[in-house]
Amino acid sequence: MKKTIGILLAFLMTLSLTACDDFDIDEFLSYDSNNQTTYTSSVEDNETTNSIVSEINEENVDDTIEENSDKPDDKSDNEITGEFSFATKDINGNDVTSDIIKDAKLIMVNFWEPWCKPCVGEMPDLQLLYDAYKDEGFLVLGFYTTEGMDSEIKSILEDCGTSYPILLATSNLTKFMTDYVPTTIFVDSKGNVISADPFIGSNSYSGWEDIIKGYLN
């Protein structure tokens, strides 16, 4: 089923995603006032898309996001606890573990999905922030859960000029996630979460910069 969903997603991406700064998928995504995308679509005039999105929500999201049964229902009151650690692969299939954070002072963990317009829209700013502050010990990690879209993700990364690590989220990271993407948390080099609550929704360069400077200083 996941393979079928991946093929259908790839077809949609081929039709609608052409460049990082100009994604024509407004009708495919559902937004709220905080510039965040839920795992459901509000498209009402396209029966094919609705069918695909419904299947994705039931199969893909249930398998990857909601398998952690102890997630609180009210995401606005989500308390982030536990050590941030993982062993996974990057988009190129290379093994990556949480050892990657040991030499960093501040790690920005950004949970995103390739079909999420606000997620992709802020990636160029995240890259600029990484370039600007990496010499001060700043690291960005991008985690996604949607499998079967490697070629589309690689195209997005190329268009956005993204060089920070893009990794497949492991099940033990679901406790740091919410029902919304993008969701962002900050951790230190020891894997301690230092953001009291998750940052839900995308942000501008200056908006993130103020937060990053506050942690670095």
Image (tube, grey):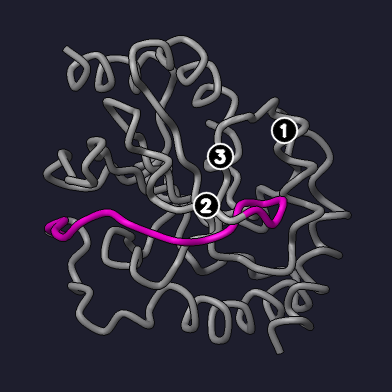
Please give the range of residues in magenta.
Answer: 78-94
Q: Position of residue 154 (x, y in %)?
A: 76, 45
Q: Position of residue 3 (x, y in %)?
A: 76, 81
In the image: residue 63, left or right of residue 11: left
Q: Amino acid at mark 2?
A: Val
Residue underneath mark 2: 96
Q: Residue at x 47, y 83 (%)?
A: 62
Magenta-colored stretch includes residue 81? yes
Q: Nearer the viewer, mark 3 or mark 1?
A: 3
Q: CA distance from mark 3 to mark 1?
A: 17 Å
Q: Amino acid at mark 1?
A: Cys
In the image: residue 140, left or right of residue 174: right
- Marks 3 & 2, CB-CB < 8 Å contact: yes
The image's mark for residue 165 is: 3
Q: Position of residue 7 (x, y in %)?
A: 82, 73
Residue underneath mark 1: 20
For the C terminus, the image quarter is top left
Q: CA distance from mark 1 to mark 2?
A: 26 Å
From the viewer's side, name the closer residue of 37 and 152.
Answer: 152
User: In the rendered structure, which disc, 3 or 2, sits on the residue that comes first in sequence?
Assistant: 2
Magenta-colored stretch includes residue 122? no
Q: Residue at x 49, y 26 (%)?
A: 126
In the image: residue 107, left or right of residue 78: right
